[in-house]
Structure formats: C-alpha cells, structure tokens
C-alpha cells in the first residue's frame, strides 16, 4: 500500500465526536494543520451535539485491536496520541501494543469525562490507564479536574492553587511519565499551563479562553504530540500547542 511520502506519521487513538470539535475528527484537523500525516483508530463512538454527550459506544475489542495491529505492521508510526479510551480492555490493548512497538513519542490525554459529566473512561479503567499507560508516556496532559482524580490530591482549604497544582504534577509524574502538563483552562487564577519534568516546573502562560471549550484538551494534546514529532523541545512545544489551540477557537 502507498504510504504517505516524507511527512511524519502520527497516530491518534481516540473517540469519534460527530460534531468535529473533539476526538478523532479534531485530532486529524490539528495534525493536518501542522503538516503531519494523521492516521487514526477509533476506540468508541459518541453521540453528541452542542449541548453535550448523549451516548457512548465502545468499539468491539477485536475490531479495535486488529486496526492497531494492522496499522503498526505496515506503517512507520512516528508518534502516538491517545484520548478517550473508554474501557479497561481498550487501555490494555493499547498498552500491550506500545510495549511491543515502543512509540518514540507518546502523548496521553487522560480523558475521563465530557464537559457535561458523561464518563468517557470507565471507573475501573482509570487505574489501568495509570498503571499501564503512564509509565510509557512522553507526556500526560490532564486538565485540572482530571489531575485531581489522577493524583487523588484534594486541595486543602488554605493551600495556594499553584502549590496544589505542583503537588498534583509530582504525584502524577511518580506514576512514570517523563513529563506532566496540567493545563490551565480550568484554573480560578492565572490560566497558565504547568509543565513538570521531575526536576523543574515551568509555567507556560497564555490568554484566558472561555472556561469549557469543547475539544480544547484534544486539540492541545494532539498539537503537543505534533510539535514534539517535528523535533521541537518540550517547553516550546507546550507553548506552541497552547497558541495553536487558541487559534483554532478564533477561527471557528
Ligand atoms: O474533550 C473530551 C472528549 C474527548 N473525546 C471525545 C469527546 C470528548 C468530549 O466530549 O467527545 C470523543
């Protein structure tokens, strides 16, 4: 089969969002905009409109697994981004694949719930994702509420938002990813993203977008993955991904 010429190939493994704002459809737009060749495997189908998610339907495990195996056996995959994975079995299949075909760059957007509160990752899949996928990751990109769930770090009443976020970065990084980026859109104060590499914290500023922008996490994480595969440093890639995310919302 003809393979895409010189472009780097990025695989997104995520849910389908028929509105195109989030999930696979949005990831492919992002990768294309960065001059990359996006390939995709769908983990689940969502039914949704501008008011929120109405239903989620996981893709059959054999269909999910065979798509991944087939793609990896033929294509040179330069980087992988994961989004909505839905079930523990989908997470295990993805992790099993990455253990055999180690992606050089793996960005995990730990999607847990939709903006209107519908689970996009089953309760029992959260620990599987933390144990099996996080240790393989170049970067994990939770928003503030996902970081709270993943770190189990509740905020004490007198704690500064910044030191709470630093504490969450540390406990998520202890699960094994090389970098943690807690995105700032849900923060009460300064909406800066916080990047942690196990040694230093880097605050990546940007203007405030509206609080819940549908799909912003998907756009950010696929842009981050894209900039990394283009050879850009982590700090610069976070900053560029933030700028790209903002631009996408200005365009629509
Ligand atoms: O933004 C989280 C998200 C990720 N992936 C899919 C979604 C959503 C939110 O609705 O539908 C497919």
Image (cartoon, helix red, strand yellow):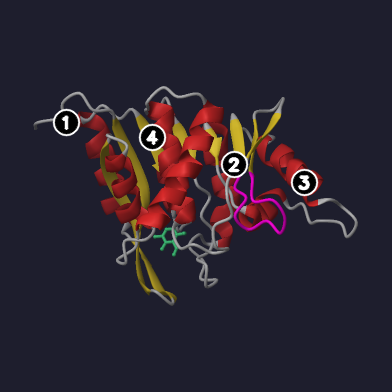
Q: Which of pointers 2 and 1 indicates the residue nearer the eye? A: 1
Where disc 3 sits, the SS reads: helix
Q: Residue 215 or 113: which is nearer the viewer?
A: 215
- Relative side of 137 to 171, left or right: left
Which residue carries the number 3 mark?
162
Which residue carries the number 2 mark?
131
Asked if the residue under mark 3 is in contact with the one under mark 4, i.e. CB atoms within 8 Å, the reply is: no
Q: Residue at x 39, y 52 (%)?
A: 248
Whole-percent x and y of residue 169?
A: 70, 40
Query: How far apart, in angstroms, are the residues tagged by discs 2 and 4?
Result: 25 Å
Label 1 vs 4, first from the N-terminus: 1
Label 4 vs 3, first from the N-terminus: 3
Which residue carries the number 1 mark?
4
Q: Which of pointers 1 and 4 indicates the residue nearer the eye? A: 4
Query: Overall secondary structure of the magenta stretch?
Result: loop
Q: Which residues are magenta?
A: 182-192
Whole-percent x and y of residue 175?
A: 65, 37
Which residue carries the number 4 mark?
226
Query: How far apart, in angstroms, are the residues tagged by discs 2 and 3?
Result: 26 Å
Label 2 vs 1, first from the N-terminus: 1
In which quadrant is the N terminus drawn?
Answer: top left
Q: Name the outermost residue toward the left.
A: 1
Q: Is residue 97 visible?
A: no
Where disc 1 sits, the SS reads: loop
Q: Which of pointers 2 and 3 indicates the residue nearer the eye? A: 3
In which quadrant is the C terminus drawn?
Answer: bottom left
């Amino acid at each position: 089969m003809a393979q895409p010429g010189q472009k780097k190939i990025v695989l997104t493994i995520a849910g389908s969002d028929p509105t195109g704002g989030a999930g696979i459809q949005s990831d492919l737009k992002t990768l294309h905009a960065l001059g990359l060749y996006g390939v995709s495997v769908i983990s689940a189908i969502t039914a949704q409109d501008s008011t929120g998610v109405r239903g989620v339907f996981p893709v059959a495990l054999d269909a999910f697994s065979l798509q991944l195996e087939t793609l990896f056996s033929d294509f040179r995959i330069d980087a992988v981004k994961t989004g909505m994975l839905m079930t523990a079995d989908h997470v295990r299949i993805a992790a099993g694949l990455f253990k055999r075909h180690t992606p050089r760059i793996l960005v995990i957007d730990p999607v847990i719930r939709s903006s209107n509160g519908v689970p996009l990752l089953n309760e029992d899949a959260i620990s599987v994702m933390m144990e099996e996928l996080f240790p393989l990751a170049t970067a994990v990109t939770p928003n503030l509420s996902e970081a709270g769930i993943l770190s189990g770090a509740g905020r004490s009443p007198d704690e500064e938002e910044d030191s709470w976020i630093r504490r969450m970065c540390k406990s998520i990084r202890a699960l094994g990813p090389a970098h943690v980026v807690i995105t700032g859109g849900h923060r009460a104060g300064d909406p800066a993203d916080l990047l942690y590499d196990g040694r230093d914290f880097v605050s990546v500023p940007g203007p405030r977008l509206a609080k819940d922008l549908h799909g912003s996490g998907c756009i950010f994480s696929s842009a981050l993955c894209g900039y990394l595969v283009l050879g850009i440093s982590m700090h610069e890639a976070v900053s560029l991904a933030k700028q790209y995310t903002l631009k996408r919302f200005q365009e629509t």
